[in-house]
Amino acid sequence: MPEIKLSSDELSLMSMFQGMTGATARDCVIDEKRNRVIFVIAKGQMGLAIGKDGASVKKIERTVRRPVEVVEWADDVEGLVKNSLGARFVQEVRVSDRLDGTKGVVVIVDSRKKGAVLGLGGKNAEKVRLLARRYFDINNVQITSEL
């Protein structure tokens, strides 16, 4: 796993998130390109992080004045991809070593749910790429559906 250095902004956001939700934030990614904050939280704390009817996330969004997304941590790339996209939509995750020495991931989703998985403007696909590169040094994530 590559070494991750957190900025003081990210550290203060994590501290605020933990204080407001009671959930343990493992990481915080400020995505300037999509104007959002992504929190990676400890396993099993998703309910605590989101709060009843999403109340905790809404409160944090009002505080940071940008959309907030929460992803549950997983120790392997398959688990992290499923947690990022929604496990119920993901049929299979294939990790492969490519000829140039990099790793790639192919995610197979239900063709009827592909739009929901990708998200508006591909924001969910971009989130998976960002997290896969950050934690597992994976350069290419492809989301497709079986025909």
Image (tube, grey):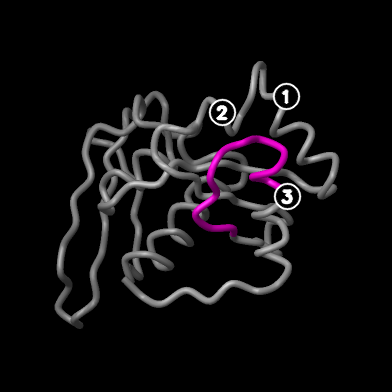
Disc 2 element: helix
**Quadrant in the picture for residue 133:** bottom left
| Residue in the image at 38% along x and 64% along y | 135
Which numbered tag is attached to residue 137?
Answer: none
Q: Amino acid at mark 2?
A: Leu
Alpha-carbon span between mark 1 and mark 3? 15 Å
Q: Which residues are magenta?
A: 16-28
Q: Amino acid at mark 3?
A: Met
Question: Percent position (x, y) of residue 142?
Answer: 34, 54
Which numbered tag is attached to residue 55?
Answer: 1
* Residue to which mark 2 is pinned: 48
Q: Amino acid at mark 1?
A: Ala
Q: Crowding at label 2, few (<14), some or many (≥20) Cα neighbours within 10 Å?
A: some
| Residue in the image at 60% along x and 51% along y | 38
* Residue to which mark 3 is pinned: 16
Disc 1 element: helix
Depth-wise, is mark 1 or mark 3 nearer the camera? 3
Does 120 sit left or right of 103 as displayed?
right
Q: Is residue 94 magenta?
A: no
| Residue in the image at 66% along x and 64% along y | 11
Q: Crowding at label 1, few (<14), some or many (≥20) Cα neighbours within 10 Å?
A: few
Does 35 sit left or right of 42 as displayed?
right
Label located before the other in sequence (2 or 1): 2
Alpha-carbon span between mark 3 and mark 2? 14 Å
Label located before the other in sequence (3 or 2): 3
Q: Is residue 71 above or below residue 54?
A: below
Contact flag, marks 3 and 2 (Cβ < 8 Å): no
